[in-house]
Image (cartoon, grey):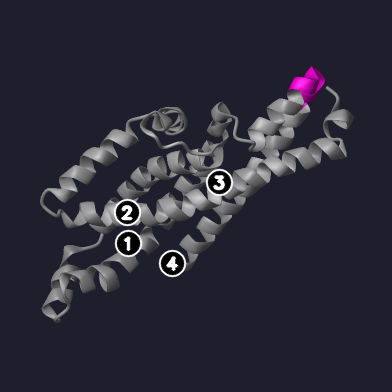
Amino acid sequence: MDFVGAYSPAHLTFLLQGFLVTLEVAFISIIFSFIFGIIIGVIRYTKIPGISQIFAVIVETIRNLPLLLIIFFTYFALPEVGLKLDKFYAAIVALVVFESAMLSEIVRGGLNSIDKGQIEAARSSGLTYIQTLWYIILPQALRRMVPPIVSQFISLLKDTSLAIVIALPELMNHAQIINGRNVNYVIPIFILVALMYFVVNYSLSLVSRRLEYKQR
């Protein structure tokens, strides 16, 4: 194991460049998957005839597919129908599709956890169903959903490493390139990569615990 060679300034800079791509992909994916997850979860919760059933089928299908397959489909299959995406955007689209389905179930579960009596009370006070959902039900549900949502975001960050299969220049891809130069770098590089993932994910966990504590 060559820790000195593995942790040279050039290698550290190269890993940080890959980590920045990882964080960028994760950040964009988190934003869009959160938005779409809420929208889909609310649609399924409202049980709109026809539409809710269609979204239920789509969500259950996506949730039961491996993310790796969705990445392959986004990058290799979509060009066959005339939609060619750059590696960066292909990874984001795949992650957003997969994580939106996961988050929509968290949102739907959170909405279902709110006492139905609150809906009846809000409606009897003159609020419309949409107003009740927006001002009464959704804010309470989101507070309850903080821990599982943050947990899903942590999974999303880790899942960015799967984009190595399409050679996205993220952290794991750069780590593999360095390891290919010298077998003595493998363990030191993987230790450092693990530490980088851990620091970010553990920070997210602390934020989740802090938010959960404030809500008590």
User: In this orientation, does residue 198 appear?
Assistant: no
Q: Is residue 121 above or below residue 156?
A: below
Query: Within 10 Å of the Cα at label 1, are there few (<14), some (14-19), or many (20+) other Cα atoms?
Result: many
Residue holding disc 2:
107
In the image, the segment drawn in magenta is 180-187
Mark 1 lies on residue:
141
Task: Locate residue 23 relative to residue 176 in the image: left or right.
Answer: left
Name the N-terminal-most of marks 1 and 3.
3
**Residue flagged by tag 1: what amino acid is it?**
Ala
Quadrant assignment for the C terminus: bottom left
- What secondary structure prevails in the magenta region? helix
In the drawing, what numbered circle is on residue 25? 3
- Say whether disc 3 or disc 4 marks the residue closer to the N-terminus: 3
**Callout 2, which amino acid?**
Val
Tag 1 secondary structure: helix
Q: Are marks 3 and 4 in contact (CB under 8 Å)?
A: no
Q: What is the secondary structure assignment of the residue under circle 2?
A: helix
Disc 4 target residue: 215
Residue 192, picture quadrant? top right
Residue 75, position in %: x, y? 47, 32
